[in-house]
């Protein structure tokens, strides 16, 4: 039965919490490592593609061979960008969950040693504000989505997708150059907006799935403070 199991004492609980804190911190480090690796792989592919396009453009005089090569190269590059964005979003959510877990453990430290509060510079609240404050963000806004790794990838994807749409319009619809540029810009804006919407909904769903146990307190001036 549950009551027959041995109960840990205060010292053992503190050891467990310290070990979990260390594990969560190590897991956060692994997410940063993977994010850097994925982005470097994606940007490396883009750099190689630009060099290849430059050689083809120079050899063909920016003619039909250049357009054909671009239409062959852009779709797989755009697909690579989409899967990179998806994985970056997974990694950011994973890191967010770990960060909230660390905040909860820090809250436990302050529960058993409240006199240590002045020496803890990071937040011990596991709400949106607490997680953002520990990253130096303050009150999070929609603008912050562009500063994330997935936000950076979303803008690059928008550029590649816009170029692909413009090339398709130029090649198959024979649109004039000014209209081709406008079509590319519209495609860029739509793609970035879709990426940002996907990122926003993913974060909202994550915060809804994990209950906030130790929220911060909002003052009448709209500021958040530790509790």
Image (cartoon, rainbow, N blue to C red):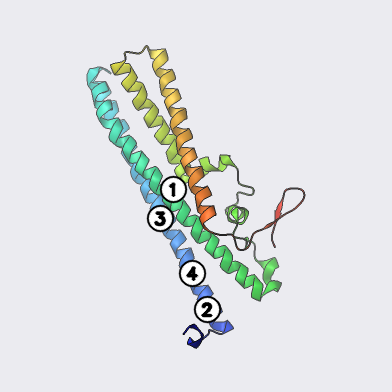
Q: Residue at x 75, y 53 (%)?
A: 219
Label located before the other in sequence (4 or 2): 2
Contact between marks 3 and 4 (CB within 8 A): the answer is: no
Q: Is residue 167 above or below residue 178?
A: below
Counting from the top left corner in percent of width and height, residue 190 is at 45, 29
Residue with the mark numbered 3: 33
Label located before the other in sequence (3 or 4): 4
Label located before the other in sequence (2 or 3): 2
Residue 83 location, quadrant: top left
Compute the Cα span from label 2 to label 3. 27 Å
Compute the Cα span from label 2 to label 1. 32 Å
Q: For numbered disc 2, what is the local secondary structure?
A: helix
Residue with the mark numbered 2: 15
Q: Residue furthest right?
A: 220
Compute the Cα span from label 3 to label 4. 17 Å
Answer whether residue 106 is visible to the viewer in this image: yes
Label located before the other in sequence (1 or 3): 3
Within 10 Å of disc 4 (Cα), the crowding (few <14, some 14-19, many 20+) is few
Label located before the other in sequence (2 or 1): 2
Within 10 Å of disc 3 (Cα), the crowding (few <14, some 14-19, many 20+) is few
Compute the Cα span from label 4 to label 1. 24 Å
Q: Of residues 216 and 66, which is closer to you in this image?
A: 216
Q: Is residue 17 above or below residue 58?
A: below
Q: Nearer the viewer, mark 2 or mark 1?
A: 1
Residue with the mark numbered 1: 89
Q: Is residue 125 above or below residue 36?
A: below
Q: For numbered disc 1, what is the local secondary structure?
A: helix
Residue with the mark numbered 4: 22
Q: For numbered disc 4, what is the local secondary structure?
A: helix
Within 10 Å of disc 1 (Cα), the crowding (few <14, some 14-19, many 20+) is many
């Amino acid at each position: 039965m549950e009551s027959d199991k041995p109960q840990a004492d205060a010292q053992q609980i503190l050891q467990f919490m310290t070990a979990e804190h260390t594990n969560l911190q190590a897991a956060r480090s692994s997410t940063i490592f993977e994010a850097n690796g994925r982005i470097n792989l994606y940007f490396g592919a883009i750099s190689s593609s630009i060099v290849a396009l430059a050689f083809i453009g120079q050899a063909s005089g920016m003619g039909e061979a250049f357009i054909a090569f671009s239409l062959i190269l852009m779709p797989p590059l755009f697909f690579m960008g989409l899967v990179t964005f998806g994985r970056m979003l997974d990694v950011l959510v994973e890191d967010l969950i770990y960060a909230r877990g660390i905040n909860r453990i820090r809250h436990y430290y302050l529960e058993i040693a409240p006199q240590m509060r002045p020496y803890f510079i990071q937040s011990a609240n596991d709400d949106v504000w607490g997680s953002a404050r520990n990253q130096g963000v303050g009150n999070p806004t929609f603008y912050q989505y562009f500063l994330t790794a997935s936000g950076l990838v979303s803008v690059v994807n928008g550029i590649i997708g816009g170029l692909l749409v413009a090339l398709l319009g130029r090649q198959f619809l024979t649109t004039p150059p000014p209209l081709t540029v406008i079509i590319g810009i519209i495609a860029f804006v739509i793609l970035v907006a879709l990426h940002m919407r996907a990122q926003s909904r993913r974060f909202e769903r994550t915060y809804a799935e994990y209950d906030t146990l130790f929220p911060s307190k909002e003052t009448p001036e709209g500021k958040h403070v530790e509790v």
